Amino acid sequence: MKNTTKHFKNLIAVAGLMTSLAAFGADVKIIANPSVKSDSISPEELKSVFLEEKSSLSDGSRVEPVLSKGGSAHDAFVKQYLGKTEATLQTYYRTLVFTGKGSMPKAEASDSDVVAYVARTRGAIGYVSPESSTDGVKTLVVVGGENFGSRKLVTHVDPVYPPELYKNHIGGVVRLKVTIAANGNVESAELLGGNPVLGEYAQAAVKTWVYAAGSSKTKTEVSIPFDPNR
């Protein structure tokens, strides 16, 4: 029992670390042409720009999304910020083109090509790996989400690991968008990414969590790892 409790406490500790990394885009660096006035962008705004739902930021800057054709940064960006796979993203863009609601975004072959294009194109916004050189462009800080606020987790319930998935060594990280009421109760936990079965168990646990009371409703992201090797 002690080992099990320690195991889940370690999971929560790792989850907290991964939440911080996800919230600030540790796997991807968001870059923009210097003509973009803002120095920061929210995950919701970033998603809207790349899904061509909007063509300007809240500060009025006109923007043009630039994709990478592949690589770790591309995979992380599509999963983390767009909530899609490469296949579903391409289908989405083709539908926009077919219906006349949008066009296929510019795509570059490498991080250096993305940086070069963003540097010379007014309003361009793209993404590269954290170690990439960003000469000639500005880096945008990804700050929280809608009504983002720092809320201390007061009470948590450990997620149950589905026995069949554990036995078959099926694991992964589940990402949830959590809506926290002013009184600290969790109103909802929306699945953003990860195995949907693990997601159900993660959602069930997170919905029983209690955060410190705040002045208003807030939203944050939580990442919960399920590791069958531990």
Image (tube, rainbow, N blue to C red):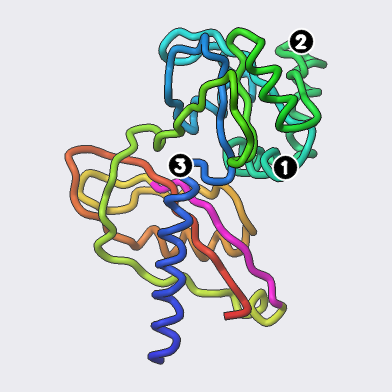
Q: Residue at x 75, y 18 (%)?
A: 106
Nearer the observer: mark 2 or 3; the answer is 3
What residue sits right under mark 3 in the picture? 24
What residue sits right under mark 2 in the picture? 100
Q: CA distance from mark 2 to mark 3?
A: 34 Å
Whole-percent x, y for residue 68 in the image: 74, 30
In this picture, which residue range is highlighted in magenta?
A: 169-178
Say whether residue 170 is magenta: yes
Q: CA distance from mark 1 to mark 3?
A: 21 Å
1 or 2: tag closer to the N-terminus: 1
Q: Residue at x 72, y 78 (%)?
A: 168
Whole-percent x, y for residue 91 in the image: 79, 31
Camera-side residue of 107 and 97: 107
Q: Residue at x 59, y 74 (%)?
A: 162
Whole-percent x, y for residue 141 in the image: 45, 31
Numbered circles on residues, count: 3
What residue sits right under mark 1 in the picture? 85
Rendered image quadrant of residue 46: top right
Whole-percent x, y for residue 229 in the image: 62, 79
Name the secondary structure under disc 3.
Answer: loop
Question: Dot 1, how many residues are within 10 Å of its Cα: few (below 14), some (14-19), or many (20+)?
Answer: some
Quadrant holding the N terminus: bottom left
